[in-house]
Image (cartoon, helix red, strand yellow):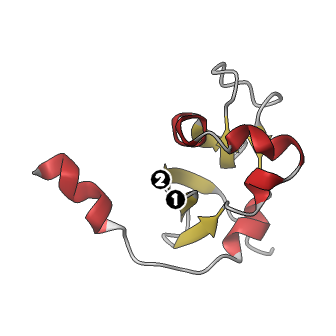
Amino acid sequence: MDYFPEVIQVIPTDDYKVYVYFDDGSIKLFDASDIINKGIFVQLKDKNTFIDSCTVLNGTLAWDINGEFDEWNCLDLDPCELYNCPEVDEPIQLFKSFTS
């Protein structure tokens, strides 16, 4: 059986990037700056919406625009496509503001 990646955690940034944590321990960096200009994803152009609604639904990166955590009513991306994003190290610099 082939591996099917599952997202377990996401951390959005102010520059429309998302650190995507997978169940195999890998961390990928997804750059959403292109998709926020296309179709239904234009709703994410507002940085607060992009960050505040970013979550994990359906085992993948999603944006819960309505705030209802409805797996059928969200913007989500294929986890296999996300798994092809560049692998990165833990974004420790993002946690420094929480520990200072």
x and y, in percent, of residue 29 in the image: 56, 70
Question: In this image, 9 relative to 82: left or right?
Answer: left
Q: Amino acid at mark 2?
A: Asp
Distance in Å between CA atoms under marks 2 and 1: 4 Å
**In this view, 24 is above or below 9:** below
Tell which of 88 and 40 is nearer to you.
40
Q: Which residue is mark 2?
A: 14
Picture mark count: 2
**Residue drawn at point x = 47 percent, y = 78 percent:** 88
**Residue drawn at point x = 69 percent, y = 42 percent:** 44
Q: Return the mark for residue 15.
A: 1
Question: In this image, 98 relative to 40: left or right?
Answer: left
x and y, in percent, of residue 83 in the image: 68, 71
Which quarter of the rendered picture does the N terminus lie within?
Answer: bottom right
Tell which of 50 and 6 is nearer to you.
50
Q: Amino acid at mark 1?
A: Asp
